[in-house]
Amino acid sequence: MQIRAYEATDWPSVWPVFQEIVSTGETIPYDPAWTSEQARKVWVEPPPGLTVVACEGARVLGTAKMGANRPGPGAHVATASFMVAVDARGRGIGRALGEYALDWACAQGYAAMQFNAVVETNDAAVHLWQALGFQIIGTVPEAFEHPTYGRVGLHIMHRRL
């Protein structure tokens, strides 16, 4: 597997992964009714941010986007979002993308990384981020409408770099 910078020609391969993850309504607070163009505008991070793809040959197994969590006085804290194709899970792709994002944020001079919306029922993500040194610093109760569990919390997770 290789992680590399996203190129415009990657969108036709990223879009099915995006649709697959968002359509379940279980892990990421994006609208499943978005068009491909709406999704691309949200997912593809403009510079100085970065979007990457995790590939095996020509196949996109996952993707991540990273950049400043907030502008101006908050720009010293990075954030990132991740998606891994359902049939590629359990192979360390999420961990590799997470480590890549942390290394990128360190190289860019960020002081910390913060995730603003980790669905509390997404056990795999919560455990992965904790294994990579993130702490849950708060939970917004009932902030995410889960298709199975109803309204569940969104964790805010943080790690100093």
Image (spheres, rainbow, N blue to C red):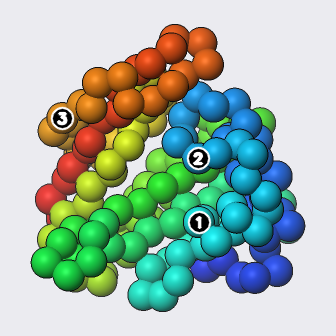
In the image, is residue 83 above or below residue 49?
above
Q: Which residue corresponds to mark 1? A: 42
Can you identify the residue that label 2 sits on? 30
Residue 40 visible in this rendered orientation of the protein? yes
Residue 133 is situated, as x and y percent measured from the top left of the image, at 23, 46
| The quarter of the displayed image where residue 103 is located | bottom left
Image disc number at residue 108: none
**Residue 138 at x, y percent in the picture:** 18, 35
Tell me which corner region of the image, top left, top right, bottom left or bottom right, holds residue 151.
Answer: top left
Write down the quadrant of residue 21 in the picture: top right
- Residue at left offset 53%, top offset 47%: 94
Cβ–Cβ under 8 Å for marks 2 and 1: yes
Q: Nearer the viewer, residue 75 or 93?
A: 75
* Three-letter amino acid code at the position of disc 2: Tyr
Position of 152 relative to 35 (above/below): above
Q: Is residue 55 visible?
A: no
Q: Amino acid under label 1? A: Val
Q: Amino acid at mark 3?
A: Gly
Q: Pinpoint residue 101: horizontal percent, then vertical percent.
A: 41, 65
Indicate which label's residue lies in the foreground, 3 or 2. Answer: 2
